[in-house]
Amino acid sequence: TILIAAIFVTKKLKIKISLKIYDFSLVKDIFSYSLWVFLFGIVYNFQWRSGQVILGITTDTATIAIYGVGIMLGGYYGAFSGGINSVLVPRATQMVFNKSDGKSLTDFMVKIGRLNAIILFMVLSGFILFGKIFVELWVGKAYEKAYIIALLLMIVMTLPLIQAFGNSILEARRKNRFKSLLSIFTVSIAILFSYYFSETNGVYGVIIPLVIAMFINSIVMTFYYKKIFGFKIIFFLKNTMAKPLIVNSFLTVITYLILKQTIIDSWFMFGIYTLIFGIIQVTLSYTILMNNYEKSLILNLLKSKRQSKK
């Protein structure tokens, strides 16, 4: 199928393919790059799927189901910023090709990181408040541990997701080898500890070593960015995470105190409270957290959607 598609495209675009000249240095670079991407992909799959295999060996099906729900909810968290992060590699390649310095690269990371931080802290604070209720309404109180699993994953994933442009820079500079080796080491150790602790601690015995491994990865990679392209760590954290963290923490505490006096035991009540919280959260994010550039992006997006409907 791929071969037929390639032939069709080359004919349609009137492209002639010549196999007479081989650039072995280019082939070597491609192989070296793709090898480490491939290895990281394998480690990534082990990271998310090994827990269920381990629990299948050491525990029962109910525990596996609880763990699976928690992993699924935690995995969805990354999707909220995935749309932004998926288009960053071409931009990173362009900046690396133009030999941008560490300040320029950090400035662009801040621009992307701010958008990710606003989105992710909104989702995280909402899940802290309503995640447990959602899990109980969806699959029952027996799956309460799934909420803890998902929450731990969301917390530890926040920094890497906000710093996603750093990974794109590594790929553009073909410096992704260290990340793959680091992940292989930390995830392998985490899997060994997970197997050891799962018999006595169940899902917590599996998820805690994994979360620790992910946390170590995020901290080490932060300093690796500094080494590779002069990443300004304090400047980045101050201009991306500080303000959204403060605003959402304040809103979360106030809402939590209100919810303590309320019983939410139906989807209708759940929908009403999450809708009110969402409206307040979006309003605060737009008026307090977003700068003029980010507000213009939102307005342009809304305008384009209205025009497409017309």
Image (cartoon, helix red, strand yellow):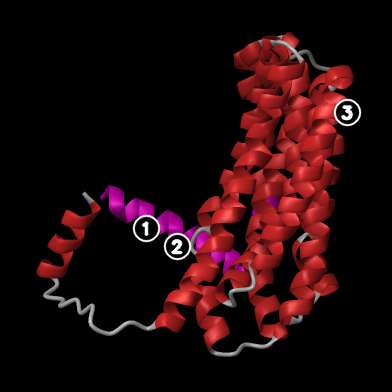
Q: Amino acid type of disc 3?
A: Leu
Q: State the separation of the CA atoms marked 2 and 1.
A: 6 Å
Q: Position of residue 52 (x, y in %)?
A: 67, 25
Above or below — where is 35 with respect to 63?
below
Q: Earlier in the sequence, mark 3 or mark 2?
A: 3
Q: Is residue 276 visible?
A: no
Q: State the separation of the CA atoms marked 3 and 2.
A: 37 Å
| Residue sitting nearer the eye, 209 or 283 | 209
Residue at the (21%, 56%) spot, across then down? 3
Residue 61 falls within the magenta-colored stretch: no
Residue on which the image places disc 3: 257
Image disc number at residue 300: 2
Above or below — where is 158 with respect to 223?
above
Residue count near mark 3 (Cα–Cα under 10 Å), binned few <14, some 14–19, many ≥20: few
Q: Earlier in the sequence, mark 1 or mark 3?
A: 3
Image disc number at residue 80: none
Q: Position of residue 14 (x, y in %)?
A: 11, 75
Q: Are marks 2 and 1 in contact (CB under 8 Å)?
A: yes
Label the magenta part by its dominant secondary structure: helix
Residue on which the image places disc 1: 304
Residue at the (57%, 83%) spot, across then down? 96
Q: Position of residue 205 (x, y in %)?
A: 84, 27
Q: Amino acid type of disc 1?
A: Ser
Q: Which residues are magenta?
A: 283-310
Secondary structure at numbered mark 3? helix
Q: Position of residue 174 (x, y in %)?
A: 59, 74
Q: Are marks 3 and 2 in contact (CB under 8 Å)?
A: no
Q: Amino acid type of disc 2?
A: Asn
Q: State the separation of the CA atoms marked 1 and 3.
A: 39 Å
Secondary structure at numbered mark 1? helix
